Amino acid sequence: MIRKISVIVLLMISINSLAQDRAVGLRAGDPFGLTYKNYFTSHRAIELGLGTSSRNWHYSYYRNSFRYYNKYDNYRYVSHYVESIIYLQARYLLHYDIIVQGMEGTWQWYWGAGGEMKLAQVEYRFQDDLFPVNGIDTDVSTVFDLGPEGIIGMEYTFEDFPLTFFGEASLMIEIADRPAAMMLFGGAGVRLRF
């Protein structure tokens, strides 16, 4: 375990030393959280994200997930409540300049690929199909989603102040938990470059 942590720390230090500049900020949307971006050149970057989302977002996703769990066979879904959600994202992005005559600052669009992991605690309420007189039961499940993600977005950086505004959309295709299920995400935010 110590060896794995050491390798991860060395990798992060190496990536950080290659960066031309960095940016740290907040992202609003799905997920909501912190974003860290390393720019290797003006056209290549990696981004790491840590966040959460509203318990009511992706309502139908969690409802539909109920039938994928074998432990709920012969049970009828009644409702669910999402207790907590954590997202981790890692992305490699390619940036392209948008030239606008007379505009100060830098405006770029970008696209890229990466991976996303989501952990959620979901309390399901259900009823036994064979013995409905037994009432409603509850159970807490840990939903673990993992998959590749495609991203497209735009960002604007001020010329005289190191502030960047961005907006983006992404699509994740799950390989863990519900293979081939797709989830759309979107967000906007601000980063301080240093």
Image: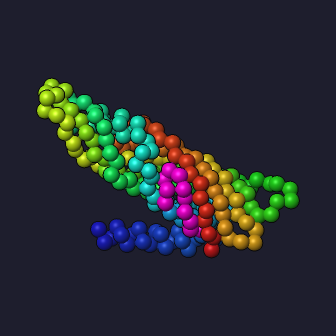
139 versus 95 height, above or below? above
Locate the N terminus by quadrant: bottom left
Residue at 68 percent across and 71 percent down: it is 162
Q: Is residue 66 above or below residue 22?
A: above
Is residue 26 found inside the magenta-colored segment of the image? yes
The magenta stretch is 23-33
> Which residue occupies 50% across, 50% down?
30
Of all residues shown, which one is farthest toward the right? 102
The residue at 35%/36% (across/down) is 63
**Magenta segment, principal secondary structure?**
strand
Q: Residue furthest top?
A: 130
Nearer to us in this view, 92 or 133: 133
Q: Is residue 37 left or right of residue 162?
A: left
In x, y percent, where is residue 11? 46, 68
Q: Position of residue 120 (x, y in %)?
A: 35, 50
Q: Residue at x 61, y 48 (%)?
A: 152
Residue 95 shows in this picture: no
